[in-house]
Amino acid sequence: MDWLARAATLRQWTSKGVRAPHKPLLLLYALARHQQDADRELAYTAVEDDLKRLLAEYGPRGRTSPAYPFHHLVSDGVWEVRTKGGHGSPGTNVGDLRASGAAGRLAADLRSSLRSDPALLGRMARTVLDLHFPPSLHRELCDAVGLEIEDAETRPLIPGQRRRSPALRELVLTAYEYQCAFCGYDGRIGAMPVGLEAAHVRWWALGGPDEVANAVCLCSLHHKLFDKGVLGVSDEHRVMVAQRFVGHSAAARDHVLALTGRPLLGPQPGASPIAPDHRSWHTDQVFQGPARPAAAA
């Protein structure tokens, strides 16, 4: 059984670039629980709050039920559900899952493969992370679900898998003249820039192209906040700060809240600005709007 291929081809509802990370999040969670106790079943009532938190933190805006992936992941052959009445899920109704004593865990064949090849767990996790989330969130996601994996041993091994462009970072940093487009940070050690990154606007994991028109130069802090949806870019190429963000310290005010409404720094003349369709995708799928009014800064 090619479990890496199964991890790479989870069936998901898709429409016009809408993010649907429900199954990937549950699979990461299940891999972590298997790593901790390979024989333990996960009662829906025991994990419902954990899954709800993960979906709220790493899913798109809007109300989402953890019952959806708990039921539907079975169709991908990596997950199984049983109730007090036997094998099989009662559906996506939360009340039915609770009342039936539904419990899930990784499919029996997958558990057997993980016992015979322990490194498979890390490779599956890395495949899911690379295909559904930006690199800035990978370590945080592993910590959130309780996964322990080593980067060096978990590079995905899917033949023909799309590769990131190694040239993009230099192209983007040059376009933005080696400064964060949000705050202007331009630190260097000698001739080498430090703490500056090429941030994809439409996530590479979800089909975003490796091109300057789909990227922006950001410092490490603002890249992370951009990928978390705290920060965004308006149609007028100004920084948006989500109203949901709360920070009372001077650092939070200076490094985040003070950015509200600030025009982007760059790109330089002749370089491609962020394309409208990529900017709209980020606003719809990642930004935790609504945005703060500029006067609130």
Image (cartoon, rainbow, N blue to C red):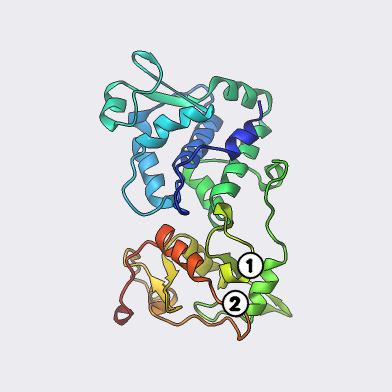
In the displayed image of the protein, which residue is found farthest to the front? 16
Nearer to us in this view, 184 or 240: 240
Answer left or right for 9 relative to 256: right
Res. 94 image quadrant = top left
Choose the circle earlier in sequence order: 2 or 1. Answer: 1
Q: Which mark is residue 103?
A: none
Residue 150 at x, y percent in the picture = 65, 44
| Three-letter amino acid code of the residue under disc 2 | Ser
Q: Quadrant of the N terminus?
A: top right
Q: Which mark is residue 272?
A: 2
Q: Are marks 2 and 1 in contact (CB under 8 Å)?
A: yes
Judge whether residue 195 can be spotted in this image: no
Residue 59 at x, y percent in the picture = 42, 50
User: In whole angstroms, how far apart are the C-alphas of marks 2 and 1?
Assistant: 9 Å
Residue under pointer 1: 211
Residue displayed at 54% across by 58% down: 203
Nearer to us in this view, 14 or 200: 14
Nearer to us in this view, 28 or 32: 28
Answer left or right for 227 relative to 243: right
In the displayed image of the protein, which residue is found farthest to the top? 85
Res. 102 image quadrant = top left
Residue 165 at x, y percent in the picture = 70, 61
Judge whether residue 224 can be spotted in this image: yes
Residue displayed at 67% across by 68% down: 169
| Three-letter amino acid code of the residue under disc 1 | Glu
Q: Quadrant of the C terminus?
A: bottom left
Helix, strand or loop status at disc 1: loop
